[in-house]
Image (tube, helix red, strand yellow):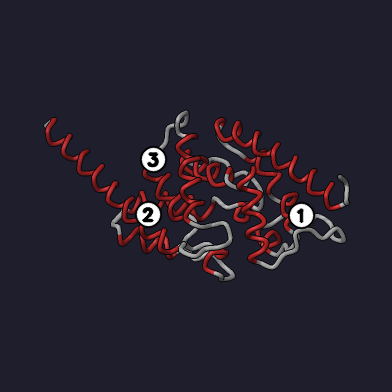
Amino acid sequence: MGGFLFWGCYYSWMKKSEILAKTVTFVQDRLKGEGTGHDWWHIERVLSNARAIMRTEKADRFVVDMALLLHDVGDRKVIHKPEDDYTIAERWLGKCEVPHDVAGRVMFIIRNMSFSASAGKRLEGAPKEFYIVQDADRLDALGAIGIARAFAFGGSRSRPLYDPSKKKQTFKTSEEYRKLNSSTIHHFHEKILHLQDLMNTKAAKRIAAKRHAYTEKYLEQFLKEWKGER
């Protein structure tokens, strides 16, 4: 009996490894030439963030990895459409013969993890994997890399760096958030500077605090230079 159990666990591990390897290739191909800050290197970074978080948080690593690998393949910003297309990730999970219950857990994360999906609010009562994935992704929007990504995305949408004639916009729903069309500097105040308070795990909160502080210092320096101060 012990031998059969070992073989079953070994097969399961091999199958998961095979699926992950195929998914890496699939995602690299889907995100090739992506220029809004949601490219393959973003995926590599958020996977690294998740590893750091999971040193102290227990979770299903396969679910976390698959959700992070696939979370941007159907993102409206990546596919240049008005709405997200979740069927891209769903079809891939089906093609890989991921069990229905596991695929459902992955898709729950992908459908609900974004800032726009929650309109900047915390989702209560979600599985641990959801919080790890969400934190890992949001950490990449803070700090030096987060700043670079914000301006890369703003440039891809022809947004100005800053427009002092405009004010920070507010929103209450996902629809209102998606309609925001501010300058990149305004975007920091409308979204990015709120992320620190929305982190779920202790590890992410610790990392976010440092990156948030760096982002604030950058914005302070930006506005000084904008006003011509030396």
* Amino acid identity at mark 1: His
On screen, residue 16 versus residue 128, left or right, reads left
Q: Earlier in the sequence, mark 2 or mark 1?
A: 2
Label located before the other in sequence (3 or 2): 2
- Which image quadrant is residue 135 in? top right
Q: Looking at numbered disc 3 in the image, what kind of residue is underneath it?
A: Arg
Q: Which residue is mark 1?
A: 186
What secondary structure is found at the residue carrying circle 3? Answer: helix
* Apparent side of residue 52 relative to residue 149 in the rendered image (left or right): left
28 vs 104, nearest the viewer: 28
| Residue drawn at (61%, 33%) of the image | 205
On-image quarter of the N terminus: top left
- Residue contact at pointers 2 and 1, CB within 8 angstroms: no
Q: Residue furthest front?
A: 230
**Relative side of 156 to 34, left or right:** right
SS class of the residue under badge 1?
A: helix
Near-viewer residue (112 or 188): 188
User: Residue at point 48% right, 34% down?
Assistant: 52
Q: Give the x, y percent position of residue 113.
A: 54, 50
- Disc 3 packing (10 Å; few <14; some 14–19; many ≥20): few
Alpha-carbon span between mark 2 and mark 1: 34 Å
Number of labels in the image equals 3
For the residues marked 1 and 3, what is the alpha-carbon distance in whole angstroms?
36 Å
Q: Residue at 45% of width from left, 30% of height from top? A: 55
* Dot label at residue 61: 3
- Numbered label attached to residue 120: none
Name the residue carrying label 2: 24
Mark before the other along the chain sequence, 1 or 3: 3
- Residue 197: x and y in percent read 67, 38
Is the residue under label 3 in contact with that under label 1 (CB below 8 Å)?
A: no
The mark closer to the camera, 1 or 3, is: 1
